[in-house]
Image (spheres, helix red, strand yellow):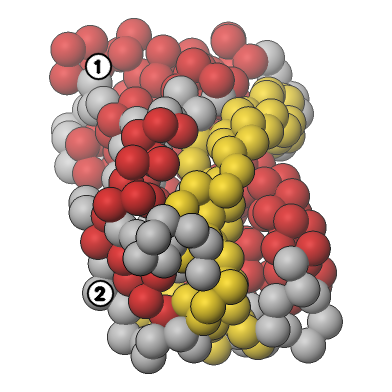
Amino acid sequence: MPEAYERHLVPVFFRPFADDLADRAAGLRPRRVLELAAGTGAFTSALLDAVPGVSVVASDLNEAMVVAGAAREPRAEWRQADAQELPFEDGGFDLVVCQFGVMFFPDRPAAYAEVRRVLAPGGRFLFSSWGSLASHGFGAAFQDALEQVMGTETPTFLKDVPHGYADPEAVAADLAAGGMELAAAEEVTLEGTADSAASVAIGFLTGTPVSAAVQGREDAQAIQDAVMRGMTDRLGGGAVTASMSATIYSAYRRNAVGRGA
Ligand SMILES: C[S@@+](CC[C@H](N)C(=O)[O-])C[C@H]1O[C@@H](n2cnc3c(N)ncnc32)[C@H](O)[C@@H]1O
């Protein structure tokens, strides 16, 4: 999965937002950064390029992602870690960052409490979460094409998980439950460009958990062929561009009387 994710999805979906988030992070002049859910390191590399001399610990729950990330971006220190139970000491980082990872944490207040614990006083937490599936040109076209083939058996993963945490009020409430205060939430829309719609279809079908619902089936190849055709019909042949929306959040530690610390 890390290879398919890195090849088909990272350049199209994650790199444009990584560059944007790295610029925001650089403005905070961080010295010691912890990255959560770092995947194969798209943001890690953008941050290391944007902030000369910064020290970055890149972590992810999935050992295969950590191995792929460490091979691709050796300038960071890589650690396997569950964001809800971080193996780091209190107050060791002045910035914690997480690009498109929080939607996957089953207990987000627990993860935010861990962020609070490992942040030094005055530290910041910067993270991003996708907007609704309808606001992601590639995701919406993929889901539509998949529904045409799989009908009622269509996996709802994309709608429920990566695009299921799009309400800033819900995010603010989870942050508060974890002892963090929301400082800003900004909706950002960027464009992604892929070599072809078919390549994005393969990325979704082999580089995300959607693969678990499709790859074991006898008709997996027929589904893949139909989704590749369906996405090409919707987005066009050759190189394709679509817009993608996300919210970028900034938060800080709440102290006992509710002010930033
Ligand atoms: C969509 S990927 C984003 C990866 C990377 N941040 C990027 O922008 O390319 C989500 C990542 O969250 C990780 N993840 C899921 N649950 C996690 C958890 N509880 N703790 C840490 N990482 C987790 C997955 O292994 C996956 O690498």
Image height of 87 relative to 241, above or below: below
Does the residue tagged 2 have its C-beta within 8 Å of any atom of ligand 1?
A: no
Q: How far apart are the alpha carbons under marks 1 and 2? A: 37 Å
- Identify the amino acid type marked 2: Glu
Residue 45 left/right relative to 147: right
How many C-alpha atoms fall within 10 Å of the one at disc 1: few (<14), some, or many (≥20)? few
Q: Quadrant of residue 63?
A: bottom left
Residue 193 appears anywhere in the view: yes
Image height of 149 relative to 75, above or below: above
Residue 2 left/right relative to 13: left
Q: State the image coordinates of residue 244 (x, y, percent, origin top left).
A: 62, 29
Q: Quadrant of residue 185?
A: top right
Q: Nearer the viewer, residue 220 or 175?
A: 175
Residue at image coords 63%, 70%? 44
For the residue labelled by badge 2, is the local secondary structure a helix, a strand or a loop? loop
Residue at image coords 69%, 29%? 189
Where is the N terminus found, in terms of image quarters?
bottom left
- Identify the amino acid type marked 1: Met
Residue at image coords 59%, 78%? 94
Q: Which residue is mark 1?
A: 150
Q: Nearer the viewer, residue 172 or 193?
A: 172
Mark drawn on residue 27 = none
Image height of 73 relative to 186, above or below: below
Please report contact status of discs 1 and 2: CB closer than 8 Å, yes or no: no
Residue projecting furthest to the front: 257
Image height of 130 relative to 151, above or below: below
For the residue labelled by badge 1, is the local secondary structure a helix, a strand or a loop? helix
In this rendering, which labeled residue sits more in front, label 1 or label 2?
2
Residue at image coords 17%, 12%? 152
Mark drawn on residue 85 = 2
